[in-house]
Image (tube, helix red, strand yellow):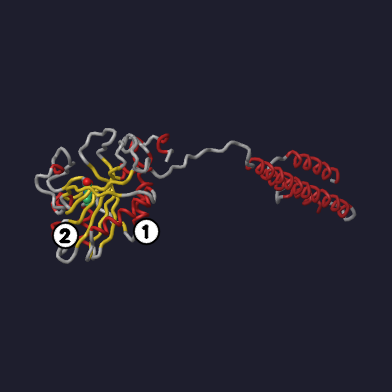
Amino acid sequence: MQEKLLNLKDIALGEIQDASTIEELEGLRVKYSGKKGQLTAIMKEMGKLSAEERPVVGKVANIVREAIEGGINTKKEEIKAIEKEKQLASEVIDVTMPGKTFTVGKKHPISQIIDEVSEIFMGLGFSIAEGPEVETIENNFDALNAPKDHPSRDMSDTFYINSELLLRTQTSPVQVRTMKSQDLPIKVISPGRCFRFDSPDATHSPMFHQIEGLVVGKDVTMAQLKGTLDNFVKKLFGEETKTKFRPHNFPFTEPSAEVDVTCFKCGGEGCAMCKQEGWIEILGAGMVHPNVLRNCGIDPEVYSGFAFGMGVERIGMLKYEIDDIRLLFENDMRFLNQF
Ligand code: PHE
């Protein structure tokens, strides 16, 4: 029986040594020391031994059992260590490998100009007002005092949606919305997208952006309009910039003016940028027409206001010396990344 036991030990230890997984080891534990295990079976037979033999064989049996248990436990630790090694090796990050490059987008130059202009006006106490791009004919033309036969109303100039709606041709309808909905005094700018039935060329795009300004309250004067715009262009183009008001005509303002600034490239000397004139036109402006105030429920005998509007693309093209408006909308990253 002792021989049987020692034999069993050798076989078991050999099998344990050959095991390569924890599961295999568990299988061996059952095979030898389990309830129906081979070692258990031999030990059950010990009852048949004589009283002298029993303690001797019992001792050997204990040694064999401990050897098998110990072998299994040691091997288990070994396998665990190997598995951990493997896992660590597989999770290692090679910091010398080349990384994946992500191209980070940036603000479109048009958005940059809108932000810059908005910030200047917010510094002057203006807040931002917004309006829809699909507007009523009423807000885009009628309430703004546009005569029924005004050329801008023509089908060939404006995208009509139906007999009441159109794609706004200017940001001026936001004036109407603001005057109808906000308490006085009003001091807002409204940047936004506008649409006109234009074929694209170097200076025209059927979709473009404007920034509108509106101030309405008691004793709002043309002097304040000039002061505000003068202040604005100095912040945008530089302290030395001067403004010039040229009489003009807009249906919604009276008097109306186009506003020129001294060329920020030559300072007024005359150069290719300003077509040798020394001045560049950048804004339309004027005192809000009494009819417009009246159309929006404001008494022109008590209140007055001024308004101005500018083309964002035009300012961007001047500022960044872009000679074709279409470049702004082609979304070629090689172009956009320059700003
Ligand atoms: N809306 C005018 C245009 O598109 C610009 C403007 C705005 C002029 C406000 C005067 C006052 O030409």
x and y, in percent, of residue 258 in the image: 23, 47
Labels 2 and 1 touching (C-beta < 8 A) = no
Tell me the quadrant of the picture where the C terminus can be found. Answer: top left
Residue at image position (77%, 51%) is: 44
Q: Is residue 19 above or below residue 114?
A: above
**Is residue 170 in sight in this rendering?**
no
Q: Which residue is mark 1?
A: 123
Residue at image position (24%, 38%) is: 206
Residue at image position (36%, 54%) is: 120
**Is residue 158 in sight in this rendering?**
yes
Q: Which residue is mark 2?
A: 293
x and y, in percent, of residue 219 in the image: 22, 65
Query: Label 2 amino acid?
Result: Leu
338 to the left or right of 225 = right
Please tell me whether mark 1 sits on a helix, a strand or a loop. Answer: helix
Q: Foreground residue, 111 or 72?
A: 111
Residue at image position (31%, 45%) is: 312
220 to the left or right of 16 = left
